Image (cartoon, rainbow, N blue to C red):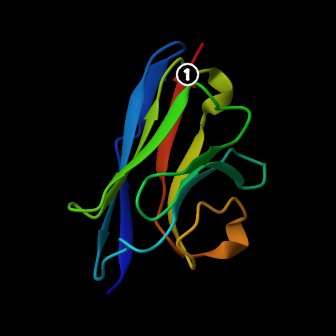
Amino acid sequence: QVQLVESGGGLVQAGGSLRLSCAASGRTFNTNGMGWFRQAPGEAREFVAAINWNGARTKYADSVKWRFTISRDNAKNTVYLQMNSMKPEDTAVYYCAAARTSFEVVNARDYDVWGQGTQVTVSS
C-alpha cells in the first residue's frame, strides 16, 4: 500500500519553530517532485512549498518565503518542512503530497498521492 505519513505537528508559540516530516512507504518517490500544502478551518487548501526530485530546486508561497524550508532525503524516502518564525496565521492542517512529475509543481491537481495531514497550531 502506497502511503505518505506526516509527523511533527503540534502546538507552538508565535516566533517558534517546528519541523514536519513526511515518510513514504509502499514505493519510492525518489523521482517525484514533493510538496507541502495546508488547510485552515473554513478555507481552501493552499500551496506551501515544493521540491524537485533531487532537491536542487524549490518553490515557496510568498506567505512562508524566508521562514520555511523544504528539503528531502531520498535515501530515507522522507521530505521535511522546517518552519521558523511561525505566526498564528500558519495554523492549519499540513499535508504532504507526491507529484506526478519530477518537478517542483505548485498546483494541487498535479499531485496524486496525499498524506493524512498533521495539525499545526501557533498561539499568539
**Residue situated furthest bottom in the rendering:** 1
For the N terminus, give its image quadrant.
bottom left
Q: State which quadrant residue 61 falls in.
A: top right
Q: State which quadrant residue 79 falls in.
A: bottom left
Q: State which quadrant residue 63 falls in.
A: top right
**Type of amino acid at the residue the image marks with label 1:** Met
Q: What element carries label 1?
A: loop
Instruction: Work out whether residue 115 or residue 102 is closer to the camera in this orientation and state it.
Output: 102
Q: How crowded is mark 1: few (under 14 residues within 10 Å), some or many (20 or more)?
A: many
Instruction: Work out whether residue 116 or residue 69 is closer to the camera in this orientation and state it.
Output: 69
Q: Position of residue 33 (x, y in %)?
A: 51, 66
For the C terminus, give its image quadrant.
top right
Above or below, 113 relative to 38: below
Q: Where is residue 99 in the image (x, y as percent from the top left)?
A: 56, 72
Which residue does the image show at 55% across and 21% down from the upper left? 86
Q: Position of residue 82 (x, y in %)?
A: 43, 34
Which residue does the image show at 62% across and 31% down from the upper left? 90
Which residue does the image show at 64% across and 32% down from the upper left? 64
Q: Name the residue under label 1.
A: 86
